[in-house]
Image (cartoon, rainbow, N blue to C red):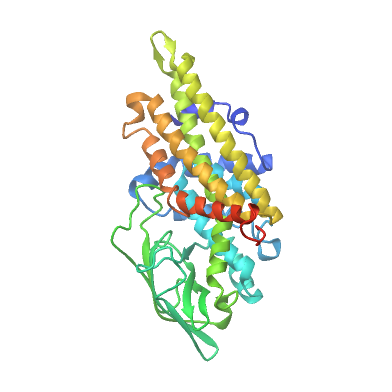
Amino acid sequence: MTALKEEIDREALWQAFSDETLLADLRDFVAKEIRPEADRIDREDYYPTEIVRKLSRAGYTNYLIEKEYGGSGGTYADAASIFEEIAVASAAVGISLITIFQAQTMLRKYGEESLKKKWLPKFGEGLLASYALTEANHGSDIRTLDTKAWRDGDDWIIDGEKHFITSGSAAEFYITLAETDAGVTVFAVPGDAPGVSIYDGENSATFGLRNGPHMNVVYDKVRLPADHMVGTEGKGVRQAATVLNHSRTLAGAISNGVSRAAYEDALAFARDRRAFDSRVLEFQGIQWYFSEMLTEIDSARLLVFRAASALDEDHQVIRWGSEAKLKAGEVATQVAVKAAQICGAYGITENAPFSRYLRDAKAYEVAGGSNEILKNTIGKFLMPVAGIEKKKPK
């Protein structure tokens, strides 16, 4: 279906919300470097190292980093466009960038100047990073951790293990959490530091967003310089949650990319498939399907770019990011299902891409903040709005 997709007027379908030159160059890159490898990345479940490094050298992975650290100092609206366009070809590549973005954001927002100068420029050179928070005994509850950190002279020592870490199979740099005497604290851990190792645990593979196995990361009394503590000691939960809230908008952009891919493939099929002496697309019922899907995708895209504006404005980030990821994730799953249905027997064959779209879409209704967590977050926003709590929503 790849050749057919190119004949669709994508510019008419999908309004651009960022710089046209940026998008034109990115689409060329995606067509040349990512789309030909997308099925193999999913099928073989490997981290797309070379693709991500090429994205870095082209300036896409460090787009939000300030110019003084080698980045573009770009906007979140442009970043959302980058993530969406990449995910049209491969959501697995998109999620590989999410973990890099999360590590960057933690350093940008909370890192000491010496830490920023040391590590942020490396992202433009292809540094691969992971956001290593989860533990086997605590899951997503990061308020209490088995991983501990303590002072030893001017250094920090970290000891413990992280579980089911996305991008862990290739990461060269980790943002991680450990518990100190003051509470949960963020640390930056180089992957080649003595005492750092990884192994493939049980149930490490997921059915969607397949960018390599989720690894367990071991810190065996790892020694870190003092400035590799990121932010304020004991404030790690708040810092980690802030970064996750920032990344949810870009997660929504990835889901929108999946929606677009499924929609375009189904539209091309319905245009060219003939039944009962007519094109499938000429049947009114099929047109209704496409009309409904397009309206939902447009709604999700508008919401994601509204959330991106909220990030640029630093206003109600939690509310808009949660809404964007929730809506985009639900729409992607619905569109993937309906697209496969429109394509009939072809839609459920192994050679068709709809299985990948559906698996990627559904996985992002769980990963990075499940739909239920997002609804809880939006509900908390509503409490002070309704006058039940006095705390002003952020």
- Residue 287 % position (x, y): 50, 19
Snapshot quadrant of residue 57: bottom right
User: Is residue 148 at all visible to an observer of this figure?
Assistant: yes
Question: Looking at the image, which is closer to me, 326 or 294?
Answer: 326
- Residue 315 % position (x, y): 69, 55
The reply, left or right, for residue 93 in relation to residue 22 is left
Residue at 61 percent across and 42 percent down: it is 303
Quadrant occupied by the C terminus? bottom right
Q: Residue furthest left?
A: 202
Q: Which residue lies furthest to the front in this view?
A: 388
The reply, left or right, for residue 333 in relation to residue 13 is left
- Residue 194 % position (x, y): 42, 79
Q: Image height check: is 223 above or below 369?
A: below
The reply, left or right, for residue 386 in relation to residue 142 is right
Residue at 46 percent across and 51 percent down: it is 372
Question: Looking at the image, which is closer to me, 184 or 301?
Answer: 184
User: Is residue 52 at all visible to an observer of this figure?
Assistant: no
Q: Image height check: is 156 above or below 31?
A: below
Residue at 55 percent across and 52 percent down: it is 379
The number of callouts visible is 0
Residue at 46 percent across and 20 percent down: it is 286
Quadrant occupied by the N terminus? top left
Question: Looking at the image, which is closer to me, 63 or 309?
Answer: 309
Q: Residue furthest top?
A: 277
